Amino acid sequence: MGRYFITLLLLSLPLTAAPADVYRSIDAQGHVQYSDTPSPGAVLVSTADVTGGADATSDDASAAKQAIEKAANQASEQLAQEDAQRAVEKDTAAAHAAQCKQAQDVYQKSITARRLYTVDANGNRQYMSDQQADAQRVQYRMAMQAACGDSSSQ
């Protein structure tokens, strides 16, 4: 009688849903990983109720699938943004290097030239005095240091 009562009691208990948390994390190589256990830096993507056996519905599966797709789209967008950021940094560094090279060339030409000149509105050369040329070389040197930083000392 006792066994029958305990068995009947256990069978009459409703099956409860276990929470299924989905966590998204990105490893050191940039790969997106999904897991049901949290890890350092992981972001909770969704919490869905999943029931066992016959109580599982297609709505639960659909909701879980949508949550995973949403997380995958967010991860893709984040990776695309990070790629764009790296491209901008690379382009900025290339532009900086080109500006530095141009400033170094102008300075070097001013040092090796016997005389410096300016061009007037009619296209005629107006040669600088020695003092003006020295002042112009100082300006070119300062412009080179501004463009290249302190690493341009020659």
Image: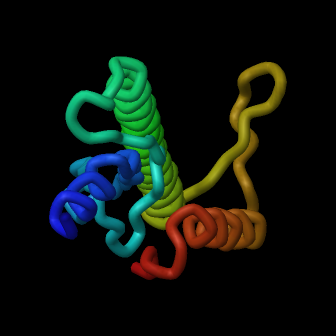
The number of callouts visible is 0
- Please state, as top left, top right, bottom left or bottom right, where the C terminus lies in the image: bottom left
Could you tell me residue 41's position as x and y percent? 41, 69
Q: Is residue 1 above or below residue 52?
A: below
Picture quadrant where residue 147 is located: bottom right
Could you tell me residue 36's position as x and y percent? 29, 56
- Please state, as top left, top right, bottom left or bottom right, where the N terminus lies in the image: bottom left
Q: Is residue 33 visible?
A: yes
Q: Residue furthest front?
A: 1
Picture quadrant where residue 67 is located: top left
Q: Is residue 4 above or below residue 64?
A: below
Say left or right for 118 vs 36: right
Residue drawn 27% across and 49% down?
11
**Residue closest to the eye, 108 or 40:** 40
**Residue closest to the eye, 142 or 15:** 15
Q: Residue furthest right?
A: 121
**Residue closest to the eye, 11 or 120:** 11
Q: Is residue 62 above or below residue 125?
A: above
**Residue closest to the eye, 83 or 32:** 32
